[in-house]
């Protein structure tokens, strides 16, 4: 397991965790938000988790309020929203910044390890500009629902733009390849 494994993390319920506790699994780390146009991806993420969890795959959700204040709730409110609206059963972590001066250490390491993203990041950046927003530039996380794929060995394999759907064939092929390792 890599240096990522040692970074302390906190679950939505306040319990301590780290990627070391998920060692040997393929992980999809996703920054999430409950009031985003991409929020319906929760449904696809839960389906993906259900499809591959028995093979050693986990989705790890990290709520963040970095983009358009689209995750204003408390950890308890986030947990309730995810359960009630999308039946989320995959591990969810405490709300924390994924960009900026207070960026949580996990996201600092993820973006360092994989500075560029696959998918349609540029057209999404242009759409954000069209809405009068100022999007981030690589290596920063662009928006909610950006995805980092981590292999069984703890190495970051790939990074996907927020608009990459959980059922995107490139993403699912990468997950299947990582599970086969």
Image (tube, rainbow, N blue to C red):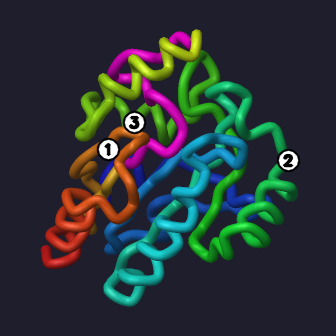
Q: Is residue 93 above or below residue 103?
A: below
- Give the quarter of the figure containing the C terminus: bottom left
Q: Which residue is mark 3?
A: 109
In this image, 29 relative to 152: left or right?
right
Magenta-drawn segment? 133-147
Q: Tell me what residue is drawn at x 64 percent, y 61 percent.
A: 92
Please tell me whether residue 135 belongs to the stretch shown in magenta.
yes
At x 52%, y 57%, the residue is: 41
The alpha-carbon separation of the residues under discs 3 and 2 comes to 25 Å
On screen, residue 28 versus residue 16, left or right, reads left
Category of crowding for the residue at label 2, using alpha-carbon neighbours closer than 10 angstroms: few (below 14), some (14–19), many (at least 20): few
Quick check: marks 3 and 2 in contact, CB under 8 Å? no
Q: Splitting the image into 4 quarters, where does residue 174 fall?
A: bottom left
As helix, strand or loop, the secondary structure at mark 1 comes to strand
Q: Which residue is mark 2?
A: 74
Give the quarter of the figure containing the N terminus. Answer: bottom left
Image coords of residue 89 (percent x, y):
62, 76
Query: How many numbered marks appear?
Result: 3
Residue 28 on image: x %, y %: 40, 59
Residue toward you, 84 or 148: 84
Image spot of residue 171 (x, y percent): 26, 59
What is the CA distance from the residue labelled 1 to the residue labelled 2?
A: 27 Å
């Amino acid at each position: 397991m890599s240096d990522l494994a040692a970074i302390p993390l906190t679950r939505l319920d306040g319990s301590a965790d780290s990627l070391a506790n998920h060692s040997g699994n393929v992980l999809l780390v996703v920054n999430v938000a409950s009031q985003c146009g991409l929020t319906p991806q929760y449904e696809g993420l839960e389906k993906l988790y259900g499809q591959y969890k028995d093979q050693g795959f986990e989705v790890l959700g990290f709520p963040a309020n970095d983009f358009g204040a689209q995750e204003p709730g408390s950890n308890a409110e986030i947990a309730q929203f995810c359960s009630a609206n999308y039946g989320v059963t995959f591990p969810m972590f405490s709300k924390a910044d994924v960009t900026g001066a207070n960026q949580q250490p996990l996201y600092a390491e993820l973006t360092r390890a994989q500075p560029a993203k696959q998918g349609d990041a540029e057209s999404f950046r242009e759409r954000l500009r069209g809405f009068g927003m100022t999007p981030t530039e690589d290596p920063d996380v662009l928006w909610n629902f950006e995805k980092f794929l981590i292999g069984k060995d703890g190495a970051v394999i790939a990074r996907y733009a927020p608009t990459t759907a959980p059922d995107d064939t490139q993403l699912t092929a990468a997950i299947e390849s990582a599970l086969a390792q």
